[in-house]
Image (cartoon, grey):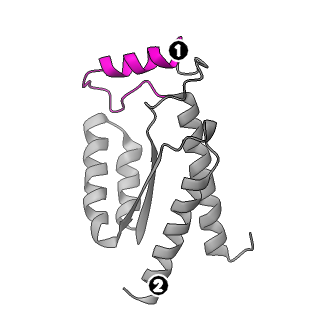
Amino acid sequence: MNDEGDCLRAALLLMAMSARTAPKGKGQDSIVTRIVLKEDLPALAAAMKAFGEKHDLRFFIRDAGNVAASAACLIIGVKGQETLGINCQGCGYSSCAAMSEACGEMEESVSPFLGPNCIMKVADLGIAVGSAVKRGTKNISGSKP
């Protein structure tokens, strides 16, 4: 790898670490990160395009082009079907146990995304993405923390 590639990888690792260490509901971490480097981007872009076409999600098709044109990609996700046991009902179920039971009853469907998801975990994902973006812009702009 060259110096630019090393710097890019270092920036992505810092962004992934920022996502991982962002505040989480009850301090329970369900964030998942993956770094995709240049050599694997064509396969990711092709999978995104196929997914977008299959489910008529045009933004996946658009973003597949953006991924294909990138030097690397940081993917941040969350295990949203894990619960925190706080029974807040934000997921639409009466308790975390009821949501977990509903998750177990879900079958493969025509919907592109599985649910239900714990609203606290979805919030954790948003905070993690925001933390990663903030770290990335600091790396790029050279501004001080």
Location of mark 2 (residue): 4
**In the picture provided, is 140 more to the left or to the right than 99?**
right
Name the spot of residue 112 as percent of width and height, x first.
33, 32
**Label number found at residue 43:** none
Q: Main secondary structure of the magenta part?
A: loop
Residue shown at the point (41%, 72%) measured from the top left: 71
- Quadrant showing the C terminus: bottom right
Which is nearer the eye, 80 or 38? 80
Residue shown at the point (37%, 22%) measured from the top left: 103
The region drawn magenta spans 92-117
Which is nearer the eye, 98 or 37? 98
Crowding around mark 1 (Cα neighbors within 10 Å: few <14, some 14 to 19, many 20+) is some
Name the spot of residue 6 as percent of width and height, x first.
45, 82
Is residue 109 found inside the magenta-colored segment of the image?
A: yes
* SS at mark 2 in the image: helix
Name the quadrant containing residue 111: top left
Discs 2/1, front = 1
Residue shown at the point (34%, 49%) measured from the top left: 61
Location of mark 1 (residue): 95
Amino acid type of the residue tagged 1 in the rendering: Ser
* SS at mark 1 in the image: loop
Q: How many marks?
A: 2
